[in-house]
Image (cartoon, rainbow, N blue to C red):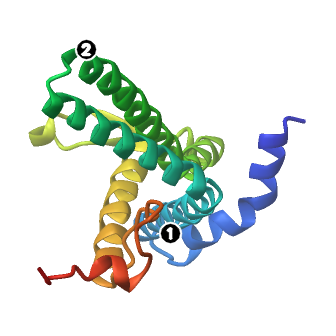
Amino acid sequence: MDPIVWLLTAIDPVLIAPFRFFNDPMTGWWAGIGALAFWSVLLGELTMAIVFRINRSAVAEKMDETAYYHEQSMKAKQAGDETAYKGINKLANEAYGKSFFLMIAMGMAALWPAFFAAAWLDMRFSDIAFILPKWAGGVELNFLAPFIICYVLMRVLYGRIKRAFGRGEKTPPRSGEPAGDEAASPSWTG
């Protein structure tokens, strides 16, 4: 048996429970889809936090490298050395590209639960279709459309709650920069 199918079958009783909370099938469907989207967002954020913690030093290193090369290229430009400026700027762009794609890869860690949830939905509800009203085009949608809508809404809601409580992602301090409250409070002397 495929390990993914085995895992989906093993956790099926937990995932199907919210769908059975209400007697009305449509209410149960939306409650279950909402719960599944919430769990997907929460598990994705947890995974992203773990990945970020593991890669924190690599991210800080790439950001330091980018800042260093940028600073050096600006010095070369101010000195009028166009050849050095172009060469160092190329190194700065490469370092920035590496840090950018590292951050993108870490961000993708938040999405795997949504694909896992979609696989479970396919296993459980692949024969269900939603037909939109004629005024909305009368298009037939499969089980995935409501999940995507709920997932996006949960992700937006989670982001707003996270921002409201001040738990936004903070980039690690670069070497030589103070960490914590010292980094947040600028010095106005001078």
Q: How many marks?
A: 2
Task: Quadrant for the N terminus, please.
Answer: top right
Residue drawn 64% across and 48% down? Answer: 120
Of the residues shown, which amino acid type is indicated by label 1? Ala
Lateral position of residue 57 relative to residue 38, left or right: right
Q: Which residue is mark 1?
A: 35
C-alpha separation, residue under disc 2 versus residue under disc 1: 58 Å
Q: Earlier in the sequence, mark 2 or mark 1?
A: 1
Q: Is residue 111 visible?
A: no
Of residues 33 and 181, the one nearer the viewer is: 181
Q: Residue furthest front?
A: 79
Which callout, 2 or 1, points to the residue nearer the camera? 2
Q: Position of residue 154 (x, y in %)?
A: 37, 65
Quarter of the image holding residue 91?
top left
Numbered badge on residue 83: 2
SS type, badge 2:
helix
Residue drawn 30% across and 75% down? Answer: 163
Q: Position of residue 7 (x, y in %)?
A: 80, 51
Residue drawn 42% across and 48% down? Answer: 63
Lateral position of residue 95 relative to residue 39, left or right: left
Q: Position of residue 119 (x, y in %)?
A: 62, 42
Of the residues shown, which amino acid type is indicated by label 2? Thr
Task: Quadrant for the C terminus, please.
Answer: bottom left
SS type, badge 1:
helix
Q: Position of residue 4 (x, y in %)?
A: 77, 42
Residue drawn 55% across and 66% down? Answer: 39
Lateral position of residue 6 relative to residue 163, left or right: right
Seen in the picture, residue 52 relative to 65 is either above or below; the reply is below
Seen in the picture, residue 77 relative to 23 is either above or below; the reply is above
Q: Residue furthest top?
A: 83
Label 1: how many Cα within 10 Å (few below 14, some 14–19, many 20+): many
